[in-house]
Image (cartoon, grey):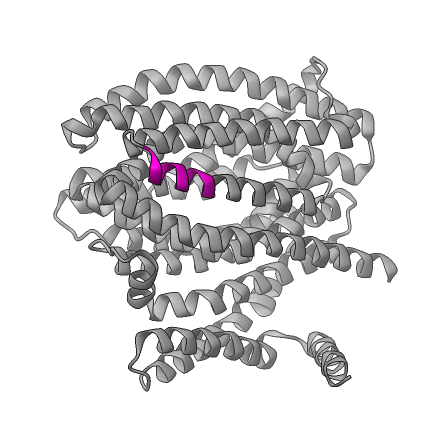
Amino acid sequence: MAEPISDNKRIAKNTMYLYFRMLITMVVGLFTSRVILNTLGVEDYGINNVVGGVVAMFSLISASISASISRFLTFELGRGDIEQLKKVFSTSVTIQFILAAIIIIVAEIVGIWFINNELVISPDRLVAARWVFHCSIISFAVGLISSPYNASIVSHERMNVFAYMSILDTILKLVIVYMLYISPYDKLKTFAVLGLAVTILMRILYGWYCKRNFEECTYHFTFDKKLFKSMFGFAGWSFFGSGSYILMTSGVNILINLYFGVIANTARGIAESVNGIISQFVSNFTTALNPSIIKSYAQNDFPKLYSLITNGAKYSYLMMLCIAVPFFLEAEPILKLWLNIVPKYTVTFVHLTLTMFLIHNISNTLITAMLATGKIRNYQIIVGGTGFLVLPITYILYHFGCNIESAYYVTISIYIIQLIYRLFLLRNMIGLPISLFLNKVILRITPVTFFVFLICHYGSTFIVNPIIRVISVGTISIFSTILFSFIFALNKHERSVFKDKLYSYIIKFKK
């Protein structure tokens, strides 16, 4: 019994470190987003968003290899094989250097052509757009080389270090905003160059820490043919899945630019920023949880694995729900208070983006469990192949004159289909019962969602002042989520633990 309790305490402790990081990054992020939008202007903000989307098209390889590295490192940590762990790290660094060189060459050739000939950008801003692209490509390559070190920190569950590094990164970005504000040079070019400088500095710091603290993080050239083939095979199929996700996001971003212009990209970029801020509440929890899922699989502890998957999916959804509801119901006043400038489509995009990621959030622990198995070919063919449908369907809809929101409706539908596919596939891959996931997750979060939205919407109708209404809806959302989660989402044991914790806090408060 001691081991599960120890695991739970470690996950809770790591989550707290990440929430500390989140509070600082969120406050700074809210401030910097407003300043950047007002300093760059709507057009340059949109250019930065869409050109960054072009770079993301190339970064799907990075996402694939990074997932491969994290999985292999965490798996070997679970097995306790230090020699194999060293081989995995050194092999991953070799792979990253090779890929970084290849991607820089390919991206520079294809990307510049695409920016010059396809994207809808004012001629007088093309030079600045190229600067953004060049700096983004180099930043991407540096991040690619950094991923083995970042993965090592997460695999060792040193979330305090991960949190401190992220806070430093956030502070440096705050410095960028100040320098951007006082810079006499082209604002968009300045923003791109300073962002690259921060990326390089963080790469140096991550490397320094890992070499000092983790035995395996000293690079030695090694070529283990079997390991190299295994990691590349895993990464190849991850590449396929990541490719579908990039096309669902950045690919659609480019279509929106082609059909609706750069202002629509600005609105989409703002909506994604809002979602990114809210998603941090969940990603902190899942980042702390993921190593335990992989290690449980490596140790063949399937009861614990199923518990981590279902509880992780349930709690991460509920955490995102209580924060998403105020943004959903009060998007317009929040955006006006936050940004001052609210481009066309932004409110609608915020609603649809939050809906998308509430649905996708349910799948996070399922994806981690899939990666833990290492046997991902059939999974990626089916789930990744479904994701590829978003881009052609959206193109057809736009071609025949459908409205800009069509892309979101298509993506939401695909997310639901992918969730269903994941459940059937993981039943075969790890024996996860579909009925278990439905009973412990879907049937528990559905009534909570309904009643939280209902209570918050009803409560907002009595308040006229927008600031007071936003604060009130936020407060109601948190307390109603806790209340209805207690009634519908928690089982008997979880309710008992919750009541004991609440009682202990009340006793401490009275003292």
Location of residue 415 in the rendering, given as x and y in whole percent from the top left corner? 41, 53
Q: Quadrant of the N terminus?
A: bottom right
Q: How many marks?
A: 0
Give whichever of 67, 114 is nearer the camera: 114
Q: Report the magenta residues as a range.
A: 174-183
Residue appearing at x 72%, y 81% in the figure: 509
Magenta highlight: main SS: helix
Query: Do we see residue 7 in this rendering?
Result: yes
Please, which residue is most extreme toward the left here? 401
Q: Is residue 178 left or right of residue 87?
A: left
Quarter of the image with the C terminus in it = bottom right
Whether 446 is among the magenta residues is no
Indicate left or right for 40 with 60 as reference. left
Residue located 54% across and 65% down the image: 319
Residue 358, x across and y down, in percent:
45, 60
| Residue at x 48%, y 15% (from the top left corner) | 101
Q: Is 295 on the left or on the right of 63, as rendered?
A: right
Quadrant of res 303: bottom right
Percent position of residue 9, x then y: 77, 59
Whole-percent x, y for residue 476 in the image: 46, 79
Establish if 237 lies above or below 96.
Answer: below
Res 415 visible? no
Instruction: Report which quarter residue 502 is drawn in.
Output: bottom right
